[in-house]
Amino acid sequence: MLIDLSGRTALVTGSTQGIGAAIAAGLAAAGARVAVNGRSVASVEKAMGRLGAAGGAFLAAPGDITTDEGARSVFEAVPQVDVLVNNLGVFGAAPALEIDDAEWRRYFDTNVLTAVRMIRHYLPGMKERSWGRIQNIASDSAVVIPAEMIHYGMSKTALLAVTRGFAKEAAGTGVTVNSVIAGPTHTGGVEEFVRELVGGDLPWDEAQREFMRVHRPQSLLQRLIEPEEIAHMVVYLASPFASATTGGALRVDGGYVDSILP
């Protein structure tokens, strides 16, 4: 399947590293001009240097989109997009009864409200042009709430609702809105998370196996997913081939969620 996104502009939030950077690289490889977003100018410039080494067209869109001021900076840098990927998110383990109100709000603001803010800005233009692709990067934790981070699971469940609701807002316009349910994925942040749970003295391969065995035994893949594997789904959903897929929650979870539908 040859996916050609030439002439399209994409914005990937939180794309200086991890899954976001892999998505940015994948969209650029398909021909899109990709706006790279991170909190600081320095982090965005560093990421663009790494991404640009493999080719592709990138532009800088720095700004902390958890704030109105940061979001305005992004909107000024990229006034119009054809593909919006809401990837920015935070996660971490915490005992359920020790998560205070401020932390609950931080997870909601970062993982949910930033996506709403971006969609609210870019969806009207997509509807006017009768074409657009919006994707929200969710998680298996939206469906299988992890006991060690229920605040994270809550935020990703809310993101599924946001996706379905905005898909209805875009009904019949040529704009699709979908969630991508990512399973346990191998990123720098996840490596730290794995070591917090299984100990920092084990070699990485052994630590990863122990994490999957103890904390994610439902996985049919029985390994962490690589960020590029998430990006493949995102690139497909950004393409004309996915024109009939909207309002969905598509799983790239390694078979982690034990159900036929999310």
Image (cartoon, rainbow, N blue to C red):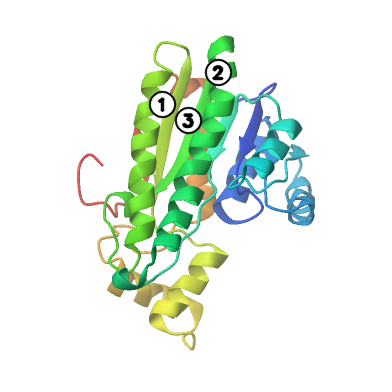
Q: Is residue 3 above or below residue 45?
A: above
Query: What label does residue 158 carry, if any?
Result: none
Q: In the structure shown, which secondary structural element does the residue marked by tag 3 occupy?
A: helix
Residue type for callout 3: Leu
Residue 238 in sight? no
Position of residue 197 measured from the top left corner of the image (x, y, whole percent): 39, 78
Where residue 9 sits, quadrant-wise, is top right
Residue type for callout 2: Pro
Mark 2 Cα shell of 10 Å, populated few (<14), some (14-19), many (≥20): some
> How far is disc 1 from disc 2 in space, using C-alphas?
11 Å
Mark 3 Cα shell of 10 Å, populated few (<14), some (14-19), many (≥20): many
Position of residue 195 measured from the top left corner of the image (x, y, whole percent): 46, 78
Q: In the structure shown, which secondary structural element does the residue marked by tag 1 occupy?
A: helix
Relative side of 227 to 142, left or right: right
Residue to which mark 2 is pinned: 124
Q: In the structure shown, which secondary structural element does the residue marked by tag 2 occupy?
A: helix
Please report whichever mark, 3 or 2, sits nearer to the chain's N-terminal start: 2
Classify the position of the C terminus by image quarter. top left
Residue to which mark 1 is pinned: 166
Residue to which mark 3 is pinned: 237
Residue 181 in sight? yes
Relative side of 116 to 48, left or right: left
